[in-house]
Image (spheres, rainbow, N blue to C red):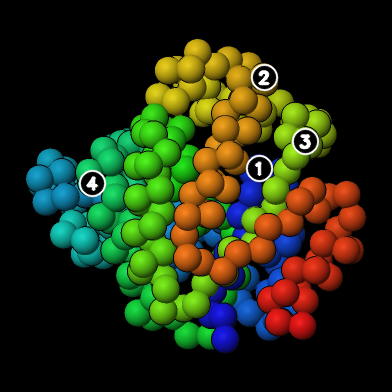
């Protein structure tokens, strides 16, 4: 029996809704991104090694200790518990966005190990297996596909005992899908994602800019993700353009997951 189902795909592909639907149909626990309590991910946490922790004042260390735990050879801190100057200082150590890769990588792999050790029952995750690693390795750090593949393979080796399966929502019309979603989500969201994808190392090295640059980055990310997925010995369900008929897509996904 599968204990872990992960729904993947590009932004605006329907991952959250699909993951929630699968969980409801199978009686699994649905974990969306942005909950702040993800069992396999650090969404808004800082990591302080011992030297970094020592750089805070005694009063700050006291405050931090009440909202943190010792893990991965350092201190994991819930950034959202703070405000003002201390919040700003902790933000510079955010697991995503600011840590150097040689620090972030083992911290994240430790989190996956922890999840597997403590996992009971079935889970449906949204996007943490491919999207988050690709945003870091490809978009932020500008690594090549082989480096991304190596990291994702390491995660797969950890979660193998859970008999994972990936449901990938493939989008063959990225431009129009994102354009429609951006009209609904608004300019603030769009400006933020354009900035992230065009001003990271990948975007700068390819001289990306604006909406077209964002779409170009997404299209390349999807190509890399599907190629990496094809090289892994992991069960997978790839659904082409599910938005064309969600009822049929959902029926097909549930049928395959149940082995009908």
Q: Residue beneath label 1, please?
A: 11
Q: Give whichever of discs 4 and 1 has the lower sequence position.
A: 1
Q: Mark 3 and mark 2: span between their CA atoms?
A: 13 Å
Determine contact: label 2, label 4, CB under 8 Å: no
Label 4: element kind: helix
Q: Which residue is mark 3?
A: 173
Q: Nearer the viewer, residue 150 or 63?
A: 150
Q: Earlier in the sequence, mark 1 or mark 2?
A: 1
Q: Quadrant of residue 200?
A: top left
Mark 1–mark 2 CB contact (< 8 Å): no
- Mark 1 crowdedness (10 Å alpha carbons): few <14, some 14-19, many ≥20: some
Question: Separation of disc 2 and disc 4 at Cα?
Answer: 33 Å
Label whose residue precedes the other's in the sequence (2 or 4): 4
Pair 3/4: label in front? 3
Tag of residue 212: 2
Q: Work out how far the residue at label 4 is from the one at label 1, CA to CA, in angstroms.
A: 27 Å
């Amino acid at each position: 029996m599968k204990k872990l189902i992960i729904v993947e795909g590009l932004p605006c592909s329907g991952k959250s809704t699909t993951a929630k639907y699968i969980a409801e149909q199978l009686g699994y626990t649905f974990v969306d991104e942005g909950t702040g309590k993800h069992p396999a991910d650090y969404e808004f946490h800082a990591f302080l090694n011992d030297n970094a922790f020592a750089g805070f004042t005694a009063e700050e260390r006291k405050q931090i200790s009440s909202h943190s735990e010792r893990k991965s050879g350092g201190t994991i801190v819930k950034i959202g518990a703070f405000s003002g100057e201390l919040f700003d200082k902790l933000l510079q150590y955010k697991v995503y966005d600011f840590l150097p890769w040689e620090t972030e990588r083992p911290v994240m792999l430790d989190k996956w190990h922890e999840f597997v050790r403590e996992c009971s029952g079935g889970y449906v995750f949204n996007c943490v297996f491919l999207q988050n690693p690709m945003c870091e390795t490809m978009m932020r750090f500008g690594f090549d596909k082989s480096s991304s593949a190596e990291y994702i393979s390491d995660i797969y080796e950890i979660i193998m005992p859970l008999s994972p399966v990936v449901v990938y929502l493939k989008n063959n019309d990225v431009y129009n899908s994102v354009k429609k979603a951006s009209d609904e989500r608004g300019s603030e969201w769009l400006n933020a994602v354009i900035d992230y994808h065009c001003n990271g190392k990948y975007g700068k090295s390819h001289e990306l800019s604006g909406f077209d640059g964002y779409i170009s980055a997404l299209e390349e990310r999807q190509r890399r993700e599907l190629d990496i997925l094809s090289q892994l010995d992991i069960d997978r369900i790839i659904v082409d353009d599910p938005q064309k008929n969600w009822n049929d897509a959902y029926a097909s996904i549930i049928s395959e997951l149940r082995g009908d």
